[in-house]
Structures are given as C-alpha cells and as structure tokens.
C-alpha cells in the first residue's frame, strides 16, 4: 500500500520513493522463498511476486524516463 511520505518537492520524487520501497519489499519477499519450491501454491506465489517486481521495475523506469509528463495544476 502506498503511504504518504514527508513532502518531497515533486510528485515524481514521491512516486519514486514509494516505488523504491515496494521494490525493496518485493525483493525481500522473493529472497525468503527457496528458488525451487515444490508446492504449486508456493510456485504460484513466487510467480506473482516476480510479476509484481517486474511491473515495479517498469514503473520506476517510466518515472525516470523523459516520457513522464509533467504534472500541471488546473489541467483539464
């Protein structure tokens, strides 16, 4: 869950800080589980965690890219 952080100067910095925290959490979750878990339920959980981590990496890459649009107040 995304939480409010002390007020960084921009939306992009806030979003990056939150994504970095989520990436760290997902990496810790993956490290806890053995690489070759035998149970189907555990394998499914690991696969979901890997997909989540990949999505977070792509989100971070997008925020760091020049494709990220500037946020302007009053835009409709």
Image (cartoon, rainbow, N blue to C red):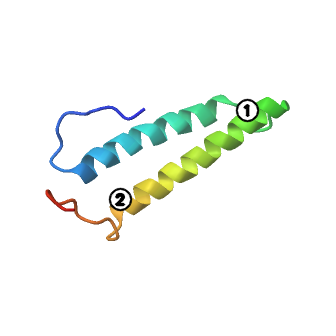
Q: Please name whichever residue, 74 or 3, is drawn nearer the observer in this view of the structure.
A: 74
Q: Say which residue appears at 33% left-offset and 48% top-offset.
A: 16
Q: Callout 2: few (<14), some (14-19), or many (20+) C-alpha neighbours within 10 Å?
A: some
Q: Callout 1: few (<14), some (14-19), or many (20+) C-alpha neighbours within 10 Å?
A: few
Quadrant, the N terminus: top left
Q: Is residue 76 above or below residue 20?
A: below
In the picture provided, is 44 more to the left or to the right than 53? Answer: right
Please tell me in which quadrant of the rendered image residue 35 appears. Answer: top right
Residue sticking out furthest to the bottom: 66
Q: Is residue 67 above or below residue 35?
A: below
Q: Say which residue appears at 76% left-offset and 31% top-offset.
A: 42
Q: Which residue is mark 2?
A: 63
Q: Position of residue 36 (x, y in %)?
A: 80, 37
Which secondary structure, mark 1? loop
Q: Earlier in the sequence, mark 2 or mark 1?
A: 1
Q: Which residue is mark 1?
A: 34
| Cβ atoms under marks 2 and 1 closer than 8 Å | no
Which secondary structure, mark 2? helix
Q: Say which residue appears at 27% left-offset and 53% top-offset.
A: 12
In the picture provided, is 64 more to the left or to the right than 45? Answer: left
Residue sticking out furthest to the front: 76
In the picture provided, is 6 more to the left or to the right than 22? Answer: left
Q: Position of residue 31 (x, y in %)?
A: 62, 34
In front: mark 2 or mark 1? 2
Q: Please name whichever residue, 35 or 43, is drawn nearer the observer in this view of the structure.
A: 43
C-alpha separation, residue under disc 2 versus residue under disc 1: 31 Å
């Amino acid at each position: 869950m995304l939480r409010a952080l002390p007020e960084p100067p921009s939306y992009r910095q806030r979003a990056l800080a939150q994504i970095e925290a989520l990436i760290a959490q997902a990496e810790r979750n993956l490290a806890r589980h053995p690489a070759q878990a035998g149970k189907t339920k555990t394998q499914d959980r690991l696969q979901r965690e890997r997909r989540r981590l990949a999505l977070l990496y792509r989100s971070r890459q997008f925020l760091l890219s020049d494709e990220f649009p500037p946020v302007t107040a009053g835009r409709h």
